[in-house]
Amino acid sequence: MNVSTKHIYTGRITDQRKIRQLFLLCFSVYFVTYLGRLSYSVSLVEIIRVEGFDKGKAGMIGTMFFFSYGLSQLFSGFLGDILPAKWLVLGALTVSGVSNVLMGRMPTPELMAAVWCVNGIAQAFIWSPLLRTLCEYMPEEERTKRCLHLNYSVPLGTVISYILSATLINAFQWRWAFYVPAVCLFAMGAAWYISMGFMERYVKKIRSGEPGVEEANTDQAEMQEEPKQRTEARPYSWKHLLVASGLFGLLPALFVQGALKDGVATWVPTFLQENYDTSSMVSILSTIVIPVCNLFGVALASMVDRLLRKDEAFGSAVFFGACGSALLVLLLWVQNHMLVALAMFTLCTTSMMAVNTILTAALPARFARTGRASSIYGIINSCVYAGTALSTYGIGALSTAYGWNATIRVWVIGAFLAMAVCFIVSRKWRIFISKYEW
């Protein structure tokens, strides 16, 4: 099956100023996306306290988001390779903004779950088009680096979301933690649409060789030859790529990564409140340290990607091992040691942030030459958020039925099993990458 490259090699921007502008635009979009995504997770402990929802029902709301988000990733990945990124992202930001407004008006957990499910669908149609935009418009030497750096928007967006929600809850009430992110999403949608219009016109000038954009045309001759060579050398479907590279074997590890990154982070404030008798405000603010430190997870992932080039699976195994070790310490020292618990949660989620950066940014970018980067990403991320969806509900139910110690034991087992899977897959991944020089 031949792979179309019509979306990938239509004109590259080599002007560094324009590259930075495009990157900052994509970065800003995903940063604001997190404000509208975490507004419920950050407000969870306060909603439980004020509205009296039990943990099972409250967790189900978050589960509906991650379930719909993960399932929709499959569709967004494939559509991201076909439909215009400008319209996909604009529509997603708008629907997400409307969903946040409605969340502040819903009186029951059932209605909130339905609205948050729609938000999950909308948010799924943002990252894949952003990834495609970077791969389509940027030269190869910039592509992987920018995709990796785009992940800094995740911890930064998380930090601001925690601070913003805590401030709004303290000053007003939890409903305002949805209204303000909605305004930000609407504003970002307008900025994206306008800015991408300018960028598309600039790229059209590159393609036509219009005077005044010489800096962006330095590699034009090379790019004109590139599509034919690469298309003939990479005649593979996404199914073949998934199996031949060993990525199919990584799917269980991706499932665990989603559970340990987002699922665990969702319940940290509740864990601190129940185990150390903290207030809702203290629980929320205490966990701000987690996304702040997660910034180092992106930096560590970038460093490991350089040191272990062409071996993303092995790098992921190392970080899964670090996560499992941190959770083991948490299991042994959880009683009466809030700072130790918070430190171990931080190390756990930072390690998972590193895995997320490696497997959902650096790894899909390797397939940019095939025109399948968005599709591969959609498949990968659907597995990640399947784990997140199950854990968001499962952690609440498991901790209620058996206690937090039993819950942490499950986390430890999952982390070390995922480490073993990554080690096993790493050999096949290295052979695949070396064979095709990707």
Image (spheres, rainbow, N blue to C red):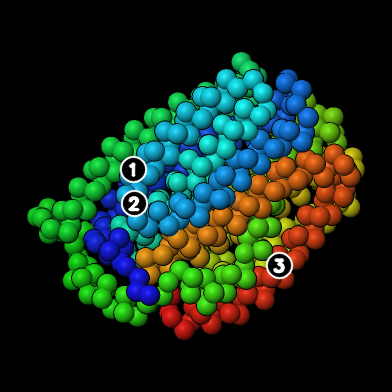
Is residue 349 visible in the rendered structure shown here?
Answer: no
Which residue is found at the position 35% from the left and 70% from the top? Answer: 3
Q: Is residue 296 left or right of residue 72?
A: right
Q: Quadrant of the C terminus?
A: bottom left
Which residue is found at the position 43% from the left and 39% from the top? Answer: 92
CA separation in Å, label 3 and label 2: 36 Å
CA separation in Å, label 3 and label 1: 39 Å
Residue 355: x and y, percent? 61, 59
Per the image, the residue denoted by label 3 is 419
Residue 155: x and y, percent? 57, 44
Q: Is the residue under label 2 in contact with that under label 3 (CB below 8 Å)? A: no
Extreme top residue here?
172
Q: Earlier in the sequence, mark 3 or mark 1?
A: 1
Tell me the crowding category of disc 1: few under 14, some 14 to 19, or many 20 or more residues within 10 angstroms, Cα based. Answer: some
Q: How many numbered discs, if any?
A: 3
Compared with 47, 211 (above or below) is below
**SS assignment at label 1:** helix
Compared with 141, 33 (above or below) is above
Per the image, the residue denoted by label 1 is 87
Which of 8/191 is in front?
8
Tell me the crowding category of disc 2: few under 14, some 14 to 19, or many 20 or more residues within 10 angstroms, Cα based. Answer: few
Q: Amino acid at mark 1?
A: Trp
Q: Amino acid at mark 3?
A: Met
Which residue is found at the position 77% from the left and 33% from the top? Answer: 55
